[in-house]
Amino acid sequence: MKWHALCLPARAAFLAPLVAAALTSAVIAQDLRPNILWLTCEDMGPNLGCYGDSYATTPNLDRLAAKGLRYLNAWSNAPVCAPARTAIITGVYPTSLGAEHMRSEVKMPAFMPMYPQLLRAAGYYCTNNVKEDYNLTKPGRVWDESSNKAHWKNRPPGKPFFAIFNFTVTHESQIRRRPHTLVHDPSRAPIPPYHPDTPEVRHDWAQYYDNITAMDRLVGERLQELEEAGLAEDTIVFFYSDHGSGMPRHKRWLYESGLKVPLIVYIPEKFRHLAPPEYRPGGVSERLVSFVDLAPSLLSLIGQEPPQWMHGKAFMGKFCAPEQKYIFGFRGRMDERFDFLRAVRNHRYLYIRNYMPHLPYGQHLAYMFETPTTQVWKALFDAGKLQPAQAAFWKSKPPEELYDLSSDPHQINNLVDSPDHRGILEELRSALREHIFAVRDSGFLPEPEMHRRAAPTTIYEFVHDPARYPLEKIYSMAELAARYDREAIPRLISGLEDPDSGVRYWATMGLLIRGQEAVATNLRKLEALLEDESPSVRIVAAWALAEFGPNEARQKALDCLLQLAPADRNGAYTAAFAVWVIDTLGAKAAAIHPQLKGIPRRDPLAPARANSYVGRLLAHIFGEPVEYD
């Protein structure tokens, strides 16, 4: 009812002051709801002047930092875009959703919205300009507008806004864009010790910094736009990148170079009551924060308590939580290459667990190999011209890595065997284990098996059902398998006959990791697994036999892989896994290469985003140009 409808003569004098007070309170309440602007970019570490990088030219972000707060320990939870954005859009670890693998697509449980839906329900006008890139099927309408025309200016009168503007000029693909006239002097480019110092590498690094300067100009334009609209003091501004730089050993890897991001937050004076305790203009925060914390923090800023199902913790606002002791990172399949790693860090140390240590760090990933740095780096390795720290990327991995970030900023010196660091190693191992069980990490099943066993429910619901997903015993076998010790072989052999396919998968993987003798002494058991009900178990058994078995066993193994390679019959995920193993085997699988030529590369039932990887793998096998969807 409008206020003037209440102005009856007999009550006017009494009601008018009360109505006026109520209106004033409503206006104040509305005014006290901040607008929120996210300015984001891609593939960039904290390589900004305000973070102490003297090679960077970033005046606009430096000015934002001078009046805002810089976070020194902010992590993307994944070192690549789609899984990283999945953590942001849900406030849930993608490992809990089955969404850790690059450009997969899984369904969310019905009770779980994406955070813009929660903001919209609270009265916010939400826009995204322009990239979405989630590993999830959107649960209905998420944004008021998501396009390259989306803008807070289009909101209805009186509505607070939440708006994202994402700048793609710093993306990995732009590092190698040629021709490019360098602005930054390549002779002054900071070259990390694991990269070779060559003209190609220096050019890529200088161009990366040129792109950062171009992005900084775009940030300045958006901030000026906000000023000119008179909204700068009504708007909380965030700036961050989606993960580390697009250079090799950065993007896709669980080092600081892949996970550490800049995070700058400006909170206007009228909203300082929402700021974290450490907020000072031009100040820094050493609080450990990561991308799963962003959605809860948004809800906290608008006065809503984050739902219990969110894993993240608000680091500002009404429901600001105590600081967490650890932050966590993960990696699964990256485009057409499979791997499985987990990471945890505290304020000083980083621990990485490699569950497929027999694989090299630098598998041949087509997109990564388009960068000149990657090409020259691998060529120098093949020619035997690299120092140990530079050559390590092209070799197999240790099962565990531990780094002191205070003394080893590039993570070169692995302390996992240091007696002096035994205590911190045990602490971080335990923290990672507790996290894995807390989120019900789905990654301990290979991607095809995860999809197969979860059907018809969502993967999230599947992994949270201990009867269907006995994580404890699968995890135990994975921990046993992903090492090189021989004492574990009897337990691995026993695991080959376990009723759970996840246990059988890891027991088989454990023999493969241990190599020739472990496989040769268990040929019959491994051959029997070529008929396993789980395609993933069959694939790993075939991999072990083709890699280390005698000719007869190798032929059986290759026949098994060939049967599982067509995407139309086996599904996109199983086919990609099988063809990846064939490619990884190299010359040992050459006998079946001709039969791969005509196999169907696409699964008509698979999401489009997951349907290009068989083709990329076959392109590598046959030396064909790669087509990117």
Image: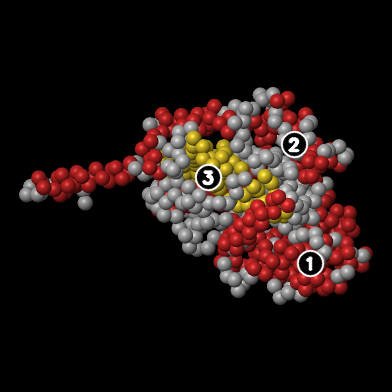
Q: Position of residue 181 (x, y in %)?
A: 69, 25
Q: Image check: 388 left or right of 218? A: right
- Asked whether the residues under the numbered discs 1 and 2 touch, taking CB atoms below 8 Å apart as contact, a structural biologist would say no
Q: Residue at x 81, y 48 (%)?
A: 395
Amino acid type, callout 1: Ala
Please give the residue where the numbered disc 3 appears in the rendered image. Answer: 287
Q: Identify the amino acid type marked 2.
A: Pro
Q: Work out whether mark 1 precedes mark 2 in sequence or the reverse, and give the earlier one.
A: 2
Residue 244 falls in image quadrant: top right
Q: Report the residue at 72% width, 35% height from top.
A: 192
One can see residue 432 in this view = no
Is residue 383 positioned above or below 572 on the image? above
Residue extending furthest toward the left: 10
Work out whether mark 1 precedes mark 3 in sequence or the reverse, and give the earlier one. 3
* Residue position marked by numbered label 2 in the rendering: 193
Q: Residues within 10 Å of mark 3 (few under 14, many from 20)?
A: some
